[in-house]
Amino acid sequence: MRYDEILIDVPLDIGNHRFSEQEILAFARDFDPQPFHIDHSAARDSHFGGIIASGWHVCAVWMRLTVDHWQAQGSVAGISPGMEHIRWLKPVRPGDHLTFQTHVSHKRRLKSRPGWAVITCHSEAVNQNGEIAFEMKGNVLFPIDD
């Protein structure tokens, strides 16, 4: 996809993912070993009432789906200069199915770096109940082929 083909405020379906208990536990053991991610008893006694996915696990799935989506479009984005906010609004439990979507809210060519633009995106994941479980706003550098 070329820079001039990127539309503002048009939702893009990035993909979906079902979180299995085995996957949640494996990710948490390796990257976020908090009790409510890895220990059934401790999770049951927490305010979550059971095992939940790490927020970083949800972010990692979003990233994988995003990279796959843009590669399928023939595009490669550059590095991200940062996120403005990341919010985990609903716990993601074993068996939850999230649908990920993003939309570009702003784009601009960089005067300081010819051949590059900054794309601002809002992304979210909605669970099987129609509830927003995760949202994020961030920027990415995008190469321009003029």
Image: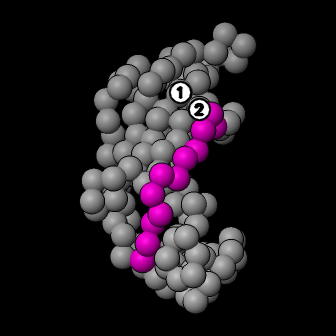
* Residue 40 falls inside the magenta stretch: no
Query: In the rendered image, which quarter contains the N terminus?
Result: top left
Query: Residue 50: horizontal and vertical position, in percent?
Result: 49, 79
Magenta part of the protein: which range?
A: 83-94
Query: Residue 133: horizontal and vertical position, in percent?
Result: 43, 54
Q: CA distance from mark 2 to mark 1?
A: 6 Å
Question: Dot 2 corresponds to which residue?
Answer: 139
The disc label shown at residue 89, or none: none
Q: Is residue 146 above or below residue 52?
A: above
Query: Residue 21: horizontal and vertical position, in percent?
Result: 46, 82
Question: Dot 1 corresponds to which residue?
Answer: 119
- Residue type marked 2: Asn
Q: Residue at x 27, y 53 (%)?
A: 130
Q: Residue at x 50, y 20 (%)?
A: 107
Q: Is residue 39 left or right of residue 106?
A: right
Q: Is residue 39 above or below residue 27?
A: below
Whether residue 26 is visible here, answered yes or no, is: no
Q: Is residue 93 above or below residue 99?
A: below
Viewer-proximal residue, 83 or 33?
Answer: 33
Assess whether mark 1 and mark 2 are in contact (beta carbons under 8 angstroms).
yes
* Residue 91 falls inside the magenta stretch: yes
- Residue type marked 1: Ile
Please tell me which of labels 2 and 1 falls first in the chain.
Answer: 1
Q: Is residue 143 left or right of residue 112?
A: left
Q: Residue at x 60, y 38 (%)?
A: 85
Which of the 4 image quadrants contains residue 56?
A: bottom right
Viewer-proximal residue, 114 or 46?
Answer: 46
